[in-house]
Image (cartoon, helix red, strand yellow):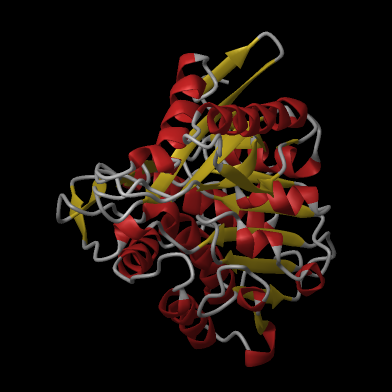
Amino acid sequence: MASAAGLPEPDLKQAETLLMQMLALPGRSGQERRVLEFIAQKLRAAGVPESAIVWDPVHQRSPWGGQVGNLVVRLPGTLRAARRLLMAHVDTVPLCVGARPVRRGERIVPAEATTALGADNRAGAAVILSAALEVLRQRLPHPPLVFLWTVQEEVGLLGARFAKLGLLGKPKLAFNFDGGPSHKVTIGATGGQRMRIRILGRAAHAGVAPQEGVSAIAVAGLAIAWLQHQGWHGLVEKPEGRGTANIGLIYGGEATNVVTPEVHLQAEARSHDPTFRRKIVQVFQEAFQQAAAQVRNIHGQQAQILWEEQTDYEAFRLAEDEPCVLAAEAAVRSVGALPERAVSQGGLDANWLTHRGIPTVTLGCGQVNPHTCQEYLVLPEFWQACRVALRLATGTESTGPCPASA
């Protein structure tokens, strides 16, 4: 199949069918086996030899464990050119489990109002699967290719973080499909730090001798209130920098008649500036230490703060003339659209690939309102992403029509 200009075109009906099948498969982070086995089966049926289908056991290195690791497929090139990587993650957030996709006009939405759709990122996974299948089905000339479907992106980009780069064959251009309109070309993303906070107070009978206790809940409340009041929780804008911070999980206590001795919290800080991100984390730690000093029992005893932190992903910004960026923009132009450069406020698999030495640009697939029950997919944008991916897979992005408004 070819366009009027003689450029390769995907079978959009087949791509939509793949997408609907993949959206219906459960596969939250750590439980992606069914999705990846579906992809592998489609590739085998298209003629990919078993030796070209490799399972990277990142789940054996991931702190989350999990059922299965990344799926890597390498196709030898029929053209002498640099190897290209097309990638997407397959896991979804828990809200997507049980989703039933339905088409309504030019949108795909969840059938029930109680689930998200999972277009983040089954759309991206379907886009690159469509590209691989079209290359094989149409026997299209192409450079050496590697396709990568990652796991556990939604819980810290773990599939990309722990991927065995040797399996990828040293790609020179890398393209990640994940989120937003098809003309969006994401060249950078924020960095993220995770905090785990454990407050150890002292238990006491809340009715008989509350003065003997040290309430871990009181300590947490004081720290959170101070952070919110001082502008260090939510959107953080200070003279020295800009970022975000959120306490997303808190639990502790078992009875109302016990002064709560222990509370656990999980929080995060994000910023494009690593120094300012570290500043947010430092302020959080100081806030909990100061709150602990304010809550004492009649013996002067106070709570202990146990602190753990980890870098989820580092911020990155690709150079303006990075080859993968220029190729991505050319591919968008080749299908008649105007590319729009963007920088993400969330983490992407591209964070870790770029940090580990493979500069990676991210393109959209039509997802809207991810991680919510209002999520939907814009089909024309998905179709356009399939066309862009096929141009990149075949190295034909530098030809084609220019946008009318260019």
Between 19 and 373, the one lying in front of the other is 373
Task: Work out which residue is located at the far left of the displayed protein and give it.
Answer: 112
- Depth order, front residue of 183/99: 99
Asked if residue 332 lies left or right of residue 81, the reply is left
Q: Position of residue 119 (x, y in %)?
A: 37, 53
Q: Residue at x 23, y 50 (%)?
A: 109
Give how far across and how far down residue 378 sits, in percent. 33, 43
284 relative to 166, above or below: above
Q: Is residue 112 above or below residue 249?
A: below
In this image, 70 relative to 298: left or right? right
- Quarter occupied by residue 315: top right
* Picture quadrant where residue 245 is located: top right
In the picture provided, is 80 more to the left or to the right than 136?
right
Residue 400: x and y, percent?
A: 60, 41
Q: Is residue 2 left or right of residue 279?
A: left
Task: Work out whether 221 lies above or below 261.
Answer: above
Image x and y of residue 281, in percent: 65, 33
Residue 375, placed above or below residue 152: above
| Residue at the (29%, 54%) spot, across then down | 117
> Furthest residue to the bottom?
50
Q: Residue furthest top?
A: 239
Q: Is residue 292 visible?
A: yes
| Residue drawn at x 75%, y 64% as measured from the top left | 143
